[in-house]
Image: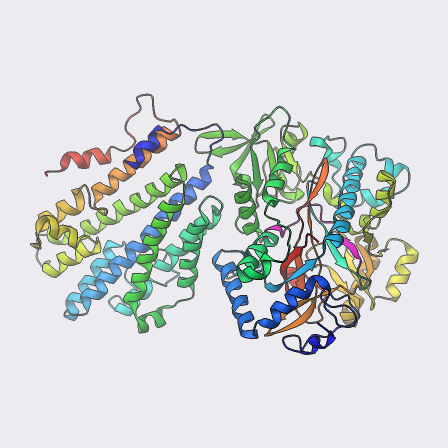
Amino acid sequence: MRFGRLCRLKLSDKYCMLSRVADNLYWMSRYLERAEHTARLLSVALNQMLDEDPQRAVLRLERMLHALRTSPPPDAPADPYAIFHLLTFDQQNAGSIASAIGAARENARQVREQISTEMWEQINRLYLRVRHANTEDTWQADPAEFLHFIKERSHLFQGVTDATMSHDEGWLFIQVGRFIERAGATATLLDTYFQIHLADETAQTLDFVDWLGLLKSCTAFEAYCKVYTADLKPEAITEFLLLNATLPRSVRFAAEQIERGLHALARLLAIGQAGAPSASPGGCALRSTTRR
Amino acid sequence: MDALELAQPPFANYQLNGAFDEMFDADGTPRPSYRALMQRLRELTPSELSSRQRTAEVSFLNQGITFTVYGDSSGTERIFPYDLLPRIITGSEWATIERGLSQRITALNHFLYDIYHEAKILNDRIVPHDLVFSCQHYRREMRGVNVPRNTYVAVTGTDLVRLPDGSFAVLEDNLRVPSGVSYMLTNRQVMKRAFPRLFANYGVRPIDHYGQSLLATLRALAPTSRPEPTIVLLTPGVFNSAYFEHTFLARQMGIELVEGRDLIVHDNVVYMRTTAGLRRVDVIYRRVDDDFLDPLAFRADSILGVSGLFNAYRAGNVALANAIGTGVADDKAIYAYVPRMIRYYLDEDPILQNVETYLLDDEQQRAHVLDRLDQLVVKAVGESGGYGMLIGPQSTATEREAFRERIRANPRNYIAQPTLSLSRAPCFIDGSIEPRHVDLRPYILFSQQATIVPGGLTRVALRRGSLVVNSSQGGGSKDTWVLFE
């Protein structure tokens, strides 16, 4: 494993990283992951709305906002355009894509000399592009294309990060930030669906399209089919998104990455060694719950 | 090549006047060092030039090579306007500049040591006592403090101008925290991309080693007991207009970029807070003004500084570049005495001339100046960045009256100089090539002796007829080529 080698690295005397820098790298990574997650959920919801009766579409949008822990726009709670604006370019909403990318870029700017030039150019270009766009034009032109662009640039940034930055302490803080954000996001999404699914009164039932939406919101539909075929069962979906060891957006996968990252950091910084408890028991707990 | 070329595109709008022209001699013939550039420019269409200009600008924006505009609430970041055409300096011109600047910075270091120790130059009545002690940047706290290697000014960016006779003169010594060197380095990178072929055959001297030279200069200041010193760059933070430069230099040198809140002083030793605990700091390249360095010693309301830093410095446990209190020697009134300092400390004639300067607390000179405010430039002694300035020929009667009042109220705070006709260099403006006024800021590194990277920041007054090159006043910059020949 790539972490394995890192664990054996010894910290040289010259080596150090400012605590503030670690904080900036961690948050840069979290905000970018957040922007990507929002873009993905919005993209899936907008796509599913296209061939659906308006009442269900409203429920779907409500569910998406709940999964993003965002309150609906006060003056137009069910208007797709208002919701799109709220989640993309609304600077008042700290969770909008534009706000998250701005915050990621601001964190990156404060550690400009710590990240590679390629990383900085990526995130700065993404920021400039979003800054020069607006809700109305994007909505009129092609909202899906814009959301796709955000997801793609976020993935590109992660790839550029892995390919151009030393996989040392700073990189580990970036990893930890990304996977903490991801674990939380997937868990919140599952929670939203299962609150409805397990509720006693069946005012709202979840159908095939809903479960499909959940899997797609985690880019997990294709991977699910390979394991369970296209037979969408709530229990199987839960198990897959919560406990699968290899799906990059499962809660377990994220928790294990966090655990590895924290262990590698602890070894690198020579802390927590003398019989200290595991840095993250979360990974172990999830592993022992797995049935497969 | 002949003078007729001046009348043809893209030079159709190029008019010579009394100012020294960097590219053409008085009868319109291109100077030898500019001939190949002229050739290349005539091969390119204006639209090709425009597209290269745009490529360069996008490249600055994408790299985040921007400065923050103060007083603009939207937090706008702007690129420092960049002109595509290089300014060329011949090898022999550079040799004079290099010797002149080395001589000047050596004398200024002697002066700073002297005024904070025995003050011989004051006692010998070469420089008046009261001029030094009334300077707002004089730091009484530095009296008798021994700074590492007696180096007060490790990093300087001296402003030079070219006079109508073609000679270079010093306009300002910037001895506190001069900025702009990152633009010198990035202008070159962008230029190499815009004109790779032209570049290859021109014999331009490289400047890429600036980062290493700066690091060596800083390392030389470390306490001798610390063979592997930790060197950091102290920035006021992300909201400072020169933040890009701070990150750029830290990266070039491979040193930590710290803010005041990252540092802590314990038992007169400076540490930085790292993920692995506290770590000792030996040399600080500080880009924070004296006033804000240490709230215990200087301005108590500073949140940019480090409490106790001055005591650690005085105890010899940390080196600062530049030293505290260097601003006294770039006071614009003290400036007038630099040629005398050179003769006093080095027993040499100054190689680079000063610009004639009237000291306004002298009654006779003041009367002379007040009669001629419409012809002179008046500057506040402690200001920089083109602020606090009156340019007589371009001023209104009301502005002159306001300055007259201010001068009378506080004559020590102002000096006056003749309105200089700065030299002009070709610039690419709206599709054609026109002359604009330029200056030159070379960067001098000093530890025991001076090191000057061959080049500097050529600043351009992009507005037609303007004489002010500061970025805060609509100035831009261009790449500066120093040739081997």
- The residue most toward the right is B364
The answer to whether A24 appears left or right of B467 in the picture is: left
The location of residue B152, given as percent across then percent down, is 72, 38
| Res A42 → quadrant | bottom left
Judge whether residue B101 can be spotted in this image: yes
Q: Quadrant of residue B290?
A: top right
In magenta segment, residue B174 = yes
x then y, percent, for residue B300 = 63, 41
Q: Is residue A263 left or right of residue B115?
A: left
Front residue of this view, candidates B161 and B171: B161
Residue at x-position 15% and y-position 34%: A288
Q: Quadrant of residue B20?
A: bottom right
Residue A8 location in percent, x, y?
35, 28
Q: Which residues are magenta?
A: B167-182
Give the image's coloring scheme.
rainbow
**Could you say which is closer to the camera, residue A194 or residue A253?**
A253
| Above/below status of A182 relative to A44 | above
Q: Position of residue B54 (x, y in %)?
A: 52, 67
Q: From the viewer's perspective, is A100 left or right of B314? A: left
In the picture as drawn, the residue positioned furthest to the top comes out as: A274
- The quadrant in which the N terminus of chain B is found is bottom right
Q: Looking at the image, can residue B152 be seen? A: no
Examine the structure image and report whether residue B484 is included in the region drawn in magenta.
Answer: no
Name above or below for residue B468 compared with residue B263. Answer: below
